[in-house]
Image (cartoon, rainbow, N blue to C red):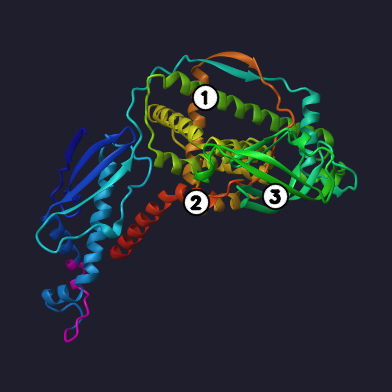
Amino acid sequence: MDSVTNVLEVSQDETKKLDAKLDIATVSACERKIVITIPPEEISRYFDKEFDEIVENANVPGFRKGRAPRKLVEKQYKKMVRDRVKNALILDSVSLLQDNDSLTPISEPDFDFDAVVLPDEERPMVFEFTLEVRPEFDLPEWKGLKIEKPVAEFTSDDVNHAMERVLSDHGTLEPIEEAASAGDYILAKLTFLANGEVISSAEQERIRIRPTLSFHDGVIKDFDQFMKGVKAGEIRETTVTLSEDAANVTLRGKDVTAKFEVKEVLRLELPELTSEFLHHFGVNDVGELKDEIKTYLQRQLEFEQRRRTRQQVTELLTVSASWTLPPALLERQAYRELQRMIMELQRSGYSDNEIRSQINYLRQNSRTATAQALKEHFILEKIAEIEGIETTEVDYDAEIRLIAVQQNETPRRVRARLEKQGQMDILRNQIVERKVLDLIFENAVFTEVPYEMPGITDEAVDHAAGGGDEAVINEATEEDLHAANREAIEKKELNIEE
């Protein structure tokens, strides 16, 4: 295990940085073991600073405010000051990592704040943790890459087919007595069983009968043939093979039984293109609606161009990169990759079902998809650093506005939700990566290939057949706990300063 030790110099003024020693050892391409040693004299300096601030205004029985002997003040406020000093030492020592050019952290330090011990005697304070970092690699030549670029001239037929898909999202469903056919909907209770035991269920799902039905962790192919002729009141059963990345670890790669209890068969009636309906889309006539739909198609083409470019860039630039990504990192980043893809699809004008379909595919192949996405991110982020690519508030406003339009919400509400869910950094990565891809576009040599318009999309259900989704989400957002701990320390530090 290679180890490198950095001893940070300190200035002599009152605001000097913490004088601590950082031992940094390489565990893997993306992991570093950090050992921080804080000498006793630094601990004493932090105690002195705290007591200097307290003694001036300390209330000690028998003495006027600020007039009590220092030893009495230290005795009365010892526990409170110890907590403050410990928090300040941890926060300041971890912040030293920002000054280390050999580290590019990609998550919060992984350690237990409560387990860190502040020594009582004249001994150094020592604690260690694991830090996930961007791997070190030499960036190959990325200018002049030969890339295939999907191109298309959208015809009136393309627009009409797309308009039918858009209108279907706003149509009405009417119950029918006759047997179902492809394109109809069923309202059904879903039950999934393994060895006769129920492993998950959904009381009521509305499902369109299409060639493929996907779940978070599996797919039913020829679903339209399986449901052909079904009527309300019928029960049909089939088999689903769960993916190797299913949340339920014990059932990965195994077959489970899917039971559909059909309550209703419904048929779609497209809406009339009235003035009121057109106003819902912000247009005045059918011509303007078709123009808007053509804009959606263009955004989806641009999304496909970026997606294909990401894939090809990664293939070309990571030929010599044999990174081993830690499983825990992949587990946590899987959730972030899902959120990134959802944002990208939303701003590109995809429907809710199309988004669910693509997200289900990612869930079914989460480890492979996440590893690929992380490699892409590392490469694009490094190009961004070299080229000085950054985000602006205008970039955020533009992205949020596109998402808001697709979700029929106000930009302010979308921004508030992203901030509350801690997803603004995901949006930031998305913006930076898109700018880098645009730069690669400008310097690439393209071979144009026909863009194949998507046909009938898969039907997607937001449900895990094998169950176990909650565990995955908890594991994926574990880094948020570390962020929360750090935020708590920062708040305490602010309170001290106040």
Q: Which residue is mark 2?
A: 471
- State which tag comes first along the sequence, 1 or 2: 1
Q: Out of 263 and 335, give the one closest to the viewer.
A: 263
Q: Quadrant of residue 65?
A: bottom left
In magenta stretch: residue 58: yes
Q: Out of 196 and 280, give the one closest to the viewer.
A: 196
Q: Out of 482 and 288, give the one closest to the viewer.
A: 482
**Amino acid type of the residue tagged 1 in the rendering:** Gln
Residue 460 percent coordinates (x, y): 67, 41
Q: Quadrant of residue 401?
A: top right
**Amino acid type of the residue tagged 2 in the rendering:** Ala
Task: Magenta stretch: give its range.
Answer: 51-63
In magenta stretch: residue 188: no
Q: Is residue 155 left or right of residue 199?
A: right
- Look at the numbered disc 1 and give the secondary structure of its residue: helix
State the residue at coordinates (44%, 39%).
330
Q: Are marks 3 and 1 in contact (CB under 8 Å)?
A: no
**Amino acid type of the residue tagged 3 in the rendering:** Leu
- Cα separation between marks 1 and 2: 30 Å
* Callout in the foreground (1, 2): 2
Mark sitting on residue 311 = 1
Mark sitting on residue 190 = 3
